[in-house]
Amino acid sequence: MLLQENVPLAPLTTFHLGGPARFFVEAKSAGEVQEAVALAQARNLPLFVLGGGSNLVVADSGWPGLVLKVAIPGIEQRPGSDDEGRVLFDAGAGESWDRFVSHAVMAKCAGVECLSGIPGSVGGTPVQNVGAYGQEVSQTIESVEVFDRKDGQIRELCREACGFTYRSSIFNTTERGRFIILRVAYALTPGGAAYIGYADLKRHFAGRETSPNLAETREAVRHIRARKGMLIVAGDPDCLSAGSFFKNPVLPEEEHADLEKRAAAKGLHLPSYPALEKSKKVSAAWLVEKSGFGLGYGFGHVGISTKHALAIVNRGGATAAEVLTLKDQIQQRVKEIWDVQLEPEPVMVGF
């Protein structure tokens, strides 16, 4: 295990901003993860676990303790244990998520094709129950292998134990900081049909007489994400972001009806989608745009993507402080105009 000092974190994130880590370790095995945790405890260092760096805002001062980058590789395939004939794909937490999706699609196994093009690593997907275009990883996760910092043991958590809800799990709520994800097992359906339930995908394939296969669906999702600046493309200034900066609000029926009335009073139609029972999911991007933060809006070194209103972008040389200033402005205006409190999606590190 190589211990490094004063390592810049900005190049390890998709936002490309923030200060250095006082100490840094890249762990390629469960043993190295255990060793790094023991080191942090022995030196009384605060520990931050880094994955693909795609959903982070790192403070300008950096991280004062040890940053542990989990880089456990490998994808293994084995028969599932259920009666549905599903196949288990066991992936190391350090694997690129999009590489894993590509692997599954090439194996003609359905369940994650709509999650193509999402940046970051496999280990990050259970934390926020990553989802897009009608699919969430909680629909296919069979189990998560973790290192439990509470007792120093490696254990396996079943799907139910992970407490998945919309963009949430025990890993970012009730047990935040307790578990370090080592591996994730996904149960996928061999020969399964691609999921084309989302409006963007329906429009993309409109007029087709045959159903698109998994590979075609994956490419369509990547194409749609690229059009919205949500695909990491070298040289595209709209890609220097943490992706969607705010969660889509999930509102109870009464609050949703009230919001619809206010939108109608302004001559606007509120886009919303079914969510949990007796609640509706509202488009955060719509709320941002209709609060005066249109595509390309910005000041200084930060702004809104020219392709998608939900992405705050680093226009070059941005600081984390500038990002938070824009975040605060957006939240304040949305609250004033629509009486909705937007919740940030990225993890704030070192603040």
Image: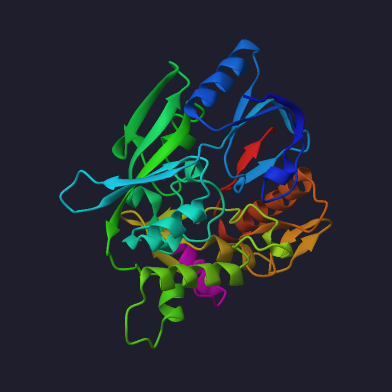
Give the vertical position of 46 relative to 239 (above or below).
Answer: above
In the figure, is residue 305 to the left or right of 228? right
> Start and end of the magenta stretch?
257-269
Give the vertical position of 294 relative to 11 (above or below).
Answer: below
**Visible residue check, residue 255:** no
Coloration mode: rainbow
Q: Quadrant of the C terminus?
A: top right
Q: Quadrant of the N terminus?
A: top right
Seen as rendered, the residue at the extreme left is: 83
| Occupied quadrant, residue 107 | bottom left
Could you tell me residue 246's position as x and y percent?
57, 53
Residue positioned 52% across, 67% down in the render: 222
The rendered magenta stretch, by its main secondary structure, is classed as helix
| Occupied quadrant, residue 44 | top right
> How many discs appear?
0
Residue positioned 74% across, 65% down in the render: 297
Seen as rendered, the residue at the extreme top is: 42
Say which of 313 and 28 sits in front. Answer: 28
In the figure, is residue 46 to the left or right of 157? right
Could you tell me residue 194's position as x and y percent?
34, 68
**Visible residue check, residue 265:** yes
Whether residue 232 is in magenta: the answer is: no
Whether residue 264 is in magenta: the answer is: yes
Could you tell me residue 39's position as x and y percent?
61, 16
Give the vertical position of 160 relative to 301 (above or below).
Answer: above
In the figure, is residue 344 to the left or right of 163? right
Could you tell me residue 303's position as x and y percent?
74, 60
Give the vertical position of 318 relative to 156 (above or below).
Answer: below
